[in-house]
Amino acid sequence: MSNATFDLYVDNAEDYRWRLVHDNGNIIADSGEGYASKQKARQGIESVKDNAPGADVVEAE
């Protein structure tokens, strides 16, 4: 079982971002955008946790 963690940080533009980091150090996913507040970034993390656990895989044709 993986012990992935969400890393919440401030980027060079002083926006908040998150990335999901596997216990081996590889980045699994990231926010893709900066957030103006830490609260909004945390809401983004919670959205991923709530909405993606059973997400289907759709293959492009």
Image (cartoon, rainbow, N blue to C red):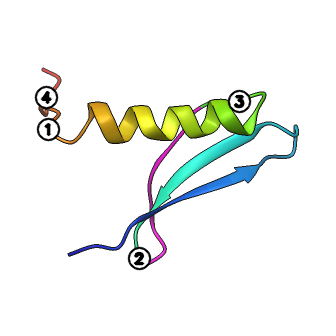
- Report the residue at 87% width, 40% height from top: 14
Q: Nearer the viewer, residue 4 or 29?
A: 4
Q: Which residue lies furthest to the right in this view?
A: 13
On the image, numbered disc 1 is attached to which residue? 54
- On screen, residue 41 versus residue 56, left or right, reads right
- Report the residue at 13% width, 34% height from top: 57
Circles 4 and 2, Cβ within 8 Å, touching? The answer is no
Amino acid identity at mark 3: Tyr
Q: Which sits earlier in the primary sequence, circle 4 or circle 3?
A: 3
On the image, numbered disc 4 is attached to which residue? 59
Query: Which SS class for mark 3?
Result: loop
Q: Which residues fall within the magenta stretch? A: 24-32
Query: Which of the image's four quarters has the N terminus?
Result: bottom left
- Of marks 4 and 3, the one in the foreground: 3
Q: Which sits earlier in the primary sequence, circle 4 or circle 1?
A: 1
Q: Which sits earlier in the primary sequence, circle 4 or circle 2?
A: 2
On the image, numbered disc 3 is attached to which residue? 35
Mark 4: few/some/many CA within 10 Å (<14, 14-19, 20+):
few
- Report the residue at 28% width, 30% height from top: 51
Q: Residue furthest top?
A: 61
- Does residue 12 lie above or below 50 as drawn? below
Q: Which sits earlier in the primary sequence, circle 1 or circle 2?
A: 2
Query: Which of the image's four quarters has the C terminus?
Result: top left
The quadrant holding residue 37 is top right
On the image, numbered disc 2 is attached to which residue? 23
In whole angstroms, how far apart are the C-alphas of marks 1 and 2?
A: 21 Å
Q: Where is residue 23 in the image (x, y as percent from the top left)?
A: 41, 76
